Image (cartoon, rainbow, N blue to C red):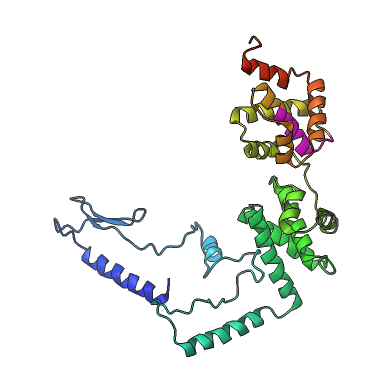
Amino acid sequence: MSVTQINVAEEVAKKSQRSADRCIECSSKNLVHDYDTGETICGDCGLVLYEKMLDKSPEWRAFTPQEKASRSRVGMPTSYSIYDKGLSTVISQVDRDAFGRMLPISTRLQMWRLRKWQIRSRVHSSIDRNLSLAMSELDRCSGKVSISPPIKEKAALVYRKALDKGLVRGRSISAIVAASLYVVCRKSGTPRTLREIAEASLVSKCDVARCYRLILRELDLHMPIADPLMYISKIAEKNGVSGKTQGAAIELLREARVKRVSSGKDPMGMASAVLYIACLQNNEKITQKDIAEAAGVTEVTVRNRYKALKKQLNLEVPTKFYLLHQKSGFVNK
């Protein structure tokens, strides 16, 4: 909203407030201002006098003078995912004034020149150019794998630390960005695999893994152990598995964890195996190929984990032959 539009809205609000000093129905001055709904109501007769009230208060709350002084600001908050943290001025490319009218050609040419030199003045050092390319790559990669804004902010902070350490020099910017994003996903428990992030960043998996190990070593980061529980819902949603079957798979995984069957196993393979067993137990039609494709593992991995869980947990899992004949009516229930 432009400055002119804000001034017009304030004038309308002042006129409406002056006209609403007294109820037009009963001439009462007992008026109630409801700031939650934006209405001005007569306290005697209940007539709604004004239903569009401008709330000029800030969106934050402060309970002490220190909090009020620290939270008061002008403009948008700083963001690590923007290369200049959002502190610089941006000249828009919209060649219209506050009333929506097209600018004259002389003014447009002047604004184009100002915009060009403003961009040149913002990005003048090698670090600024590096951050500009890296943050645009991070924004693209995060959107492709559906990463939330808080995770993207943390990934930008990890990349800035790697840049300060000199880890980006001589290496691919896209690989360091993908590795930073994978570090934050692992640390926050976001179910994104290294293969998914590598495919989104258009960098080979080996390069991303190499940069990932470099960041862990140089920044002294410690990653938590990957939990197969995070990947069950992700695999199930891709195959349309019911919530009941997902709950059964979670119970199987917890039992395997108690008996230490899942120790040292690939979390994605273990999640695929317990989900496949739960589908067989709940009579849901799904193949090992579907599970393997959704999890990004091979059918051999699913089959081996399935056999190991069935043997070590003493599970009675019906075979596909039994389920097929049971649906056909040849086997008694």
Q: Is residue 14 above or below residue 248?
A: below
Residue 277 rendering spot, x and y as whole percentages: 72, 26
Is the stretch drawn in magenta largely helix, strand or loop? Answer: helix
Residue 231 rendering spot, x and y as whole percentages: 70, 39
Quarter residue 39 falls in: bottom left
Quick check: is 269 in the magenta stretch? yes
Which residues are the magenta region? 264-276
Quick check: is 332 in the magenta stretch? no
Residue at image location 66% in from the left, 11% down from the top: 331
Residue 209 rendering spot, x and y as whole percentages: 82, 53
Residue 59 lies left or right of residue 229; in this view the side is left
Quarter residue 250 falls in: top right
Q: Nearer the viewer, residue 269 or 224?
A: 269
Q: Is residue 292 above or below residue 314?
A: below
Q: Nearer the viewer, residue 50 or 110?
A: 110
Is residue 31 shown to the viewer in this render?
yes
Outermost bottom residue: 106
Residue at image location 62% in from the left, 64% down from the top: 79
Residue 23 lies left or right of residue 166; in this view the side is left
Outermost left residue: 26
Quarter residue 210 falls in: bottom right
Residue at image location 67% in from the left, 27% down from the top: 279
Split into 4 quadrants, where in the image is the N terminus?
bottom left
Q: Nearer the viewer, residue 303 or 38?
A: 303
Q: Is residue 260 above or below residue 202?
A: above
Residue 220 rendering spot, x and y as whole percentages: 83, 55
Residue 44 lies left or right of residue 89; in this view the side is left
Residue at image location 53% in from the left, 85% down from the top: 111
